[in-house]
Amino acid sequence: MANDPMLDMFIYENVQLTERLEEILIECENLGGFTEEHVNEIFRIMHTIKGSSAMMEYEPIATLGHHIEDMFFYIREHHPTTLNSDEIADICLNAVDFFKQEVAKIQAGGPSDGDTTAHLTRIEAFMATLTNKGGTPAPAAEASPPPAPETAESPAASSNGLNCYHCTIIFDDGCKMENIRAYQIANTLADYAETIETVPADLLDDCADEIVANGVTITMYSDTPIDVIRSIISEALFIKHFELSGDAGKVSAPAPAPAVLAEPPVVSEPPPIPKMEVPPMQVSPIPAAAMPAGGAEPVSAPAPKRTAADEIPVSPVSEIKQNFISVNVEKLDKLMDLMGEIVISVSMVVNNTDLTGLQLDNFEKASAQLLKNTGELQGIIMSVRMLPISSTFHKMSRIVRDTSKKLGKEAELIILGEETEVDKNIIDNLSDPLMHIIRNSMDHGLEDNREERINSGKNPVGRIVLEARNSGSDVIISCTDDGRGLNRDKIVDKAKAVGLMTRPDNEYTDKDIYQFIMNAGFSTNDTVTELSGRGVGMDVVKKNIEKVGGTVDLDSTPGQGMTVNIRIPLTLAILASIEISVGKNNYLIPTLNIREAFKPNMDDIVIDPDGKEMIMYRGECFSIVRLHQLFNVETDVTNFQDGIMIMIEDDDYMTCVFADLMVGEQQAVVKPIPSFITERIGDIYGIAGCTLLGDGSISLIIDVKSLTH
Amino acid sequence: MDELNEMITSGETQGMYLTFSVGDEEYGMEIDYVMEIIQVSPITEVPDVPHYIKGLINLRGKITPVMDVRLRFNKPPREYDERTSIIVVSQDDNTIGLIIDTIRDVLTIEDSQIGDPAGIKTGTPNRYIKSIARTDHGNKLIIHLERVLSDH
């Protein structure tokens, strides 16, 4: 089901649209009202959502979309003077949530069966107040269907400068699904039209035969130039021929067709049915060819615009779009996997042992070229997967809005560095943790009320700063609030109570103490949440971030607020590492985790009564992990003098591992241990994954985290 | 080996079995499971795994775990030689290599030739053996691949 490209596209489009909608709504709310442009854009988005979901037969989404579209249609048409923009935003945001829910259901392969009643009732109630206030006679119910009846009664449409177009389309013989094709065209045109009608009326009904026989007739009122309409229709597939005529009201003089368009709409009555008072324009496959020379001008200057914002339909958006294509992420993943393989294959060829000792000038040249090209290719493929973090950040505005309403705390979110790019996989895993962090800040970080903030000399409106920036091969995302900060003493008490503190209090730095709240046992306890002010889900945050290879730390100044720093790698794909050997096995250690490597001095080795080996190095004592023992590998190198000591670190935790030899540097494409093995024995202690090396052999990657902590 | 691989990949598999030996016994398995047969390539050891999982091999860029069938059947280990082969099988999404002593042949075995191991008088049948086939080339023990690959 999910492989259906139509469905994929629907889901993709819907997600994009709902996200955009959410952004607009938040923006509007910050502005304290809806501008004309916003109203138009929301209207268009709702319209598209409605159209596409009706086509895919997702009734609930279509219904709700339809009603919201109507609401905005009303707002757009009648410009109510007093608008309760809060209520509108609430209605729409609720609808956005509903859409998201439904789309998630659909994505999971289920039906879209959500209940729209509550939403609809609220919209109706709102419309009722709106129409009463506005003093417009039209009751809510009638305002909802935007189509002709209303327009026909009132001269609104044509006096507003709208042109009336009639179009009859005949499809290619035997092209099948004529009604659906007609629906698609009508749907596309609807974006440009104030109102649109088709004969047959319900294209989604089974009326293909009728269309085959008579074609489909579309009547629409629009301020879009006829050229644009024509090009839209001619872009559709399988059209045998079509007739498009424009009619700006009832014009007597049968002037050349294009000129008619230019006529300002003087008379009110829109013609009931394409009566062809105006000679219809037969549009040949080469558009505009049939146009008289002077035709272009009048067409380009159509009837006066009602508002500037109404021009948008011929928006630049559609032009920008053509520079982008949307690609299934799975394909990108495959591409990247393949790229990894190619990098390895190339180095297998170039460094082939069969070639050692041979003088191969041309080969050297060619392989240098090959290496350069694959390097570039790799760079590009990586960059394809990089996305700016902005959409994730903007989602947080919603969280701040909702929580601030719920808690009755005022707060603003400041977003910095949203253009920072991160691997798509990582972005997907960031939303949840960020959401937790922000909720935490809102709930526990910020003071409960304005007075408390004013008393501590702060701005009464709480402030949360979300920032992303690059730092070497990492991206740092920090979330800072200016609330109360962490209470060290209380955390210490709690940590003691649950037995997390193994050393005396004064041996811990403040930072060490703060890390405790990310401990699972710590945060699930409700009372901790109350007294420390934090902890809800911080362990979840930590877990999620670690899943994508990142780290989390906390910092806080009591009374001034706190900062959560998330450090994540730019990409997970390629790991620079050092290859070491133990017996006949080779292992890789990520270069970033290696502090230094040295030949141990036997005098520095300390053995405690349990037989645990340690080493004194630069005045500090580190425990030693013998890799041959850990991985149960036979080796001749068991004396410390014969091998090498590698100090590895992770998060300030350090350990020395003992190996036979350091072999060299490797660029590793990290792969998981095959599930056949992990299903059997779970994760292997000390092993993070495996990789193929240039010579085709497989090497295991050492899990520095588990060895150091 | 190339010949066998061709037979494996050539469409018709109904009633076809790949036969091989481990120790003194000859075994067979439905050819549907078999993806290809390869020679033993360098194996990367993985710590903490059961002794019959020998590690990982590079199967044309795909990291594939290998299991020693000899050890799986609780037979004493034996040095790999030039006849030792790896039968690459697929089950669900997993691709696994089975190390066996010697590849024998691909045979067509009729259902009528296959008997229930429970009917054999030697006592409890081995849980890795699904049935026994009587062929012109002697008796073959048809292995129960799911059980061989499962973690019990």
Image (cartoon, coloured by chain):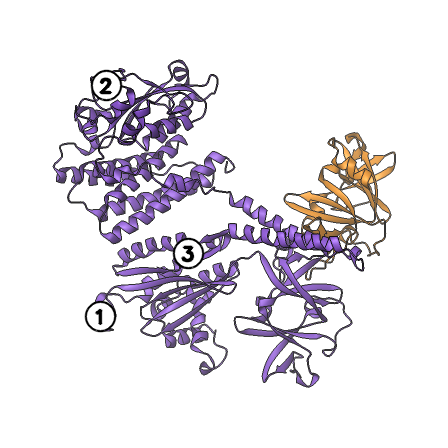
Chain colours: A purple, B orange
Question: Mark 3 or 1 closer to N-term?
Answer: 3
Whether marks 3 and 1 lie on the same chain: yes
Residue at the spot x=79%, y=30% of the render? B110
First reached walking from the N terminus: tag 2 or tag 1: 2
In the picture shown, does residue A153 fall above or below A468? above
In this rendering, which labeled residue sits more in front, label 2 or label 1? 2
Q: Chain of mark 1?
A: A
Identify the residue shown where x is 31% and y is 45%: A94
Q: Disc number at residue A272?
A: 2
In the image, residue A678 sits, relative to residue A523, either above or below, namely above
Q: Using the image, name the chain to which the residue with label 3 belongs.
A: A
Chain of the residue that carries numbered disc 2 in the rendered image:
A
Q: Is residue A394 left or right of residue B114?
A: left
Foreground of the two, A627 or A354: A354
Share a chain, discs 3 and 2? yes
Which mark is drawn over residue A419?
A: 3
Q: Residue under label 1, please give it.
A: A454
Q: Position of residue A415 (x, y in %)?
A: 35, 59
